[in-house]
Structure formats: C-alpha cells, structure tokens
Image: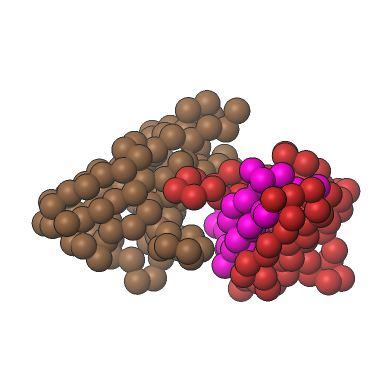
Amino acid sequence: AQSVTQPDIHITVSEGASLELRCNYSYGATPYLFWYVQSPGQGLQLLLKYFSGDTLVQGIKGFEAEFKRSQSSFNLRKPSVHWSDAAEYFCAVGTGELSFGAGTTVTVRA
Amino acid sequence: GAVVSQHPSRVICKSGTSVKIECRSLDFQATTMFWYRQFPKQSLMLMATSNEGSKATYEQGVEKDKFLINHASLTLSTLTVTSAHPEDSSFYICSASRQEETQYFGPGTRLLVL
C-alpha cells in the first residue's frame, strides 16, 4: 500500500526567508513523487515531479525537491519565499492513482 | 500545455435535483480521468477513476448510482451528482493524465446544495 505523510500541518515563514516542507512516503516500488500547490478555492497546480534520474528536481516558481530513498523522503524547498507562495501544498505518490498527504498550509508574513 | 478545465466553476442547486460537472483536457488526450472530492481544509479524496470508453472504477464508499461518471471521449469526462442533498455540498476536482503519467488538475467546482 502506498501512503504519504506531511508532518507539518501549518508553517509560517517570513517573506524572503527559506522554506522547507517535509514529505515522507511509503511505497512498494520505485515511486513517482509529486508536489502540488493549491491556492484558496482553486485546483491543484503541479510544482514538480520525480520519476527517475537526478534526485534533485527543479520545479516552477523557484521550488526544488530532493528525493532521498534512504529516508523515504521528498522534501520541498524554496530559498526565498514570496507573499504569493502562501497556499496549501500537497505531496503525492503513485503511478496512475495518487495518494496525497494531508497538506501543509503555508502562511507568509511580511 | 496540459491544461484541464472544469465547468461550471460553482453551482447552487435545490435538494433533489441533479447537477452535471464537466472536465475537459484542452490540449492533450487523456487516457484516464480522476474525480476527487475535497472537504474544507482537508486533502483530496479520490472518488473514482475513469478510462475512455469503459465504466468508471469507484472507490470504496462512493455510491456509483449517486455519482454517475461518463468518459465519452479522450478529452471529456462528466460527473453527475444525482438527487443532490446538502451533504453533497463540496469542492469537486477532476484531473487528467496520459498513460499513467502526471495528473493535471482542473480548477475545481464548488457545489452548494440548498
């Protein structure tokens, strides 16, 4: 069975500071991993994905994520957050059918 | 590329009526479409998976007679909430993918049943 854990329900970060969102997964084979962002009342936008190859993945909006097989993790990072990064972030794992984490709400303070 | 649209974006209906939500992949052919339901401040709950031309596969606990899914073409899937009741009020999101690749999500439909 596949599952995803996002340990942090809510993170508050100052504008310009760095951000790291944690994601741990359980999957029986080589996982396909995704990070999505959801603004209030909107659908999900794909930030980045990992299928294979380089374990450091670059995404849109300045985000990156690193796949660490030994830790079963796929943490999302951004060096300097902008106020527009305030949103809900979901980590997901799977091929075809996805399993989503519970989400992490990011608040950006001025 | 990989744009998915949903229509309507929000709908209000009376209890007992049926509501149809459309999901379209605008610039690619989607072999599989997914329907999710999202409650406030919660993650997405997969309702069903549909492949073009075949019956949808529903997740456990989802009533197939209440949530009718049709995937008539490689670019269109519809979800019909039949005899809607207030407890069906929710945010419904579809996604589309090609050959078990990345899922691309629509903007969601907010349903309010009075």
Q: Is residue B9 left or right of residue A39?
A: left
x 77%, y 56%: residue: A19
Which quadrant: the N terminus of chain A? bottom right
> Which of the pair B58/A69 is nearer the observer?
A69
**What colour do you see for chain B?**
brown
Could you say where residue B33 lies in the image, as x and y percent from the top left?
46, 45
> Which of the pair A41/A15 is nearer the observer?
A15
x 72%, y 59%: residue: A13
> Which of the pair B69/B38 is nearer the observer?
B38
In the rendered image of this protein, does residue A15 appear above or below residue B24? Answer: below
- Is residue A101 covered in magenta? yes
Give the residues drawn in magenta, as a range.
A80-109
x 40%, y 58%: residue: B37
Q: Which chain is red?
A: A
Could you say where residue B52 lies in the image, as x and y percent from the top left?
41, 41
x 33%, y 57%: residue: B90
